[in-house]
Amino acid sequence: MLPIIHASRILLGLLFLAFGLNGFYTFIPVPEYHPFMEILVSSGYIYLVKSAEVVCGILLLSNRFVPLALVVLGFDIINITTYHLLLDPRNVWIVPILWCLLLVLIFGYRTYFFELFSFRAKPDLK
């Protein structure tokens, strides 16, 4: 199981690094933007999203702060899924790939996520 987790981490890191960098320097051809994507690009908000993708991709590839990168990318993958399912289904094939990789990694790093699900968390005041 360990090789699958490492391969998933590297593949997800490469995907987000490549597509995140593509938001700054277009080296992968991009089809005509959907009107919603045009709003994100013209407002500059897309640069925040792409910056998070690049940083998390680097974190995954360097095997540093992987659980944190998975939490951030989890929200990004939810947004990617919603965008492709509801607005622009042209590249919807990427959605199941992203979910499979994310779920494999969450399963592989599951012990780091147990603390997030504390029912009655108390502040640590020492």
Image (cartoon, grey):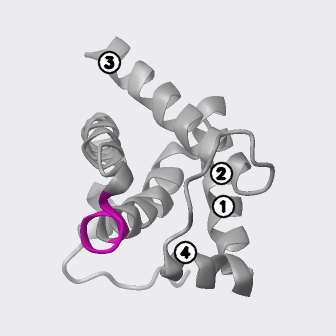
Disc 4 + disc 3, Cβ < 8 Å: no
User: SS class of the residue under badge 1?
Assistant: helix
Spatial CA distance of label 3 from label 1 is 26 Å
Q: Which of marks 3 and 1 is in front?
A: 1
Disc 2 + disc 1, Cβ < 8 Å: yes
Spatial CA distance of label 2 from label 4 is 15 Å
From the image, tell me which residue sits under label 2.
Answer: 20
Left or right, 34 with respect to 41, comes to left
Q: Where is residue 121 in the image (x, y as percent from the top left)?
A: 30, 81
Q: Residue at x 36, y 12 (%)?
A: 3
Q: Which of marks 3 and 1 is nearer the N terminus?
A: 3
Q: Position of residue 35 (x, y in %)?
A: 51, 81
From the image, tell me which residue sits under label 1.
Answer: 50
Q: How crowded is mark 3: few (under 14 residues within 10 Å), some or many (20 or more)?
A: few
Q: Which of marks 4 and 1 is nearer the N terminus?
A: 4
Amino acid at the residue labelled 4:
Met
Q: Earlier in the sequence, mark 3 or mark 2?
A: 3
Q: Earlier in the sequence, mark 2 or mark 1?
A: 2
From the image, tell me which residue sits under label 4.
Answer: 37
